Image (cartoon, grey):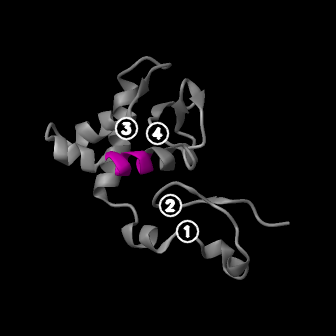
């Protein structure tokens, strides 16, 4: 029986156990070399804080778009905040893994590791 899956500390995606990691599964923290190099930086932490702040200012059942957090961190310059869209989605996935928020599509909670297209973020219930 393989061990339980883990969550990548950088992108928040699910890491499935692989035979090649059998000896060092306890040390596996990232899903890829790119995530290991990227890690979690100050901008990532600011995006998580922006998600938390934006949700705190809304009704408990309200949702936000990752672009709201990207705009809060990147400002009004479209090129800047658009570049923060994928980091905002990564921040949301990390927060889902910690049980802080949920990611929805069409009003239903979805797995953020496999969600394609537009997503919304809400407080965990």
Q: Quadrant of the N terminus?
A: bottom right
Q: Are marks 1 and 2 in contact (CB under 8 Å)?
A: yes
Q: Are marks 1 and 4 in contact (CB under 8 Å)?
A: no
Which span of residues is magenta-colored? 85-91
* Residue 121 to residue 59: above or below: below
Mark closest to the chain's N terminus, 1 or 3? 1
Q: Which residue is mark 3?
A: 66
Q: Residues within 10 Å of mark 2 (few under 14, many from 20)?
A: many
Q: Of label 1 and label 2, which has the lower sequence position?
A: 2
Earlier residue among tags 2 and 3: 2
Q: CA distance from mark 2 to mark 4?
A: 22 Å
Nearest to viewer (mark 2 / mark 3)? 3
Label 2 vs 4, first from the N-terminus? 2
- Asked if residue 114 can be seen in this view, the reply is yes
User: Of circles 1 and 4, which is in front?
Assistant: 4
Q: What is the distance, in whole Å, between disc 1 and disc 2 at their CAs?
A: 6 Å
Residue 47 placement, left or right of 31: left
Placement of 107 over or under 89, stated as above or below: above
Residue shown at the point (54%, 43%) measured from the top left = 115
Pointer 4: what residue?
117
Looking at the rendered image, the disc whose residue lies closer to the viewer, 4 or 3, is 4
In the rendered picture of this protein, how many numbered marks are placed on residues? 4
Mark 4, secondary structure of its residue: loop
User: Left of 106 or right of it: where is 22?
Assistant: right
Tell me whether the residue at label 2 lies in contact with that at label 4, contact meaning CB atoms closer than 8 angstroms: no
Q: Main secondary structure of the magenta part?
A: helix
Q: Which residue is mark 2?
A: 9
Q: Which residue, as the protein is rendered here, is positioned at the far right?
A: 1
Badge nearest the viewer, 1 or 3: 3
Reply yes or no: does residue 28 show up in magenta.
no
């Amino acid at each position: 029986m393989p061990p339980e899956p883990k969550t990548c500390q950088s992108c928040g995606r699910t890491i499935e156990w692989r035979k090649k990691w059998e000896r060092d599964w306890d040390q596996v923290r990232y899903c890829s070399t790119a995530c290991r190099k990227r890690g979690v930086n100050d901008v990532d932490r600011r995006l998580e804080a922006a998600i938390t702040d934006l949700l705190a200012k809304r009704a408990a059942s309200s949702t936000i778009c990752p672009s709201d957090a990207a705009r809060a961190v990147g400002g009004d310059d479209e090129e800047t905040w658009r570049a923060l869209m994928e980091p905002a989605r990564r921040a949301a996935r990390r927060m889902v893994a910690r049980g802080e928020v949920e990611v929805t599509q069409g009003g239903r909670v979805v797995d953020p590791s496999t969600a394609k297209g537009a997503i919304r973020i809400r407080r965990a219930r």
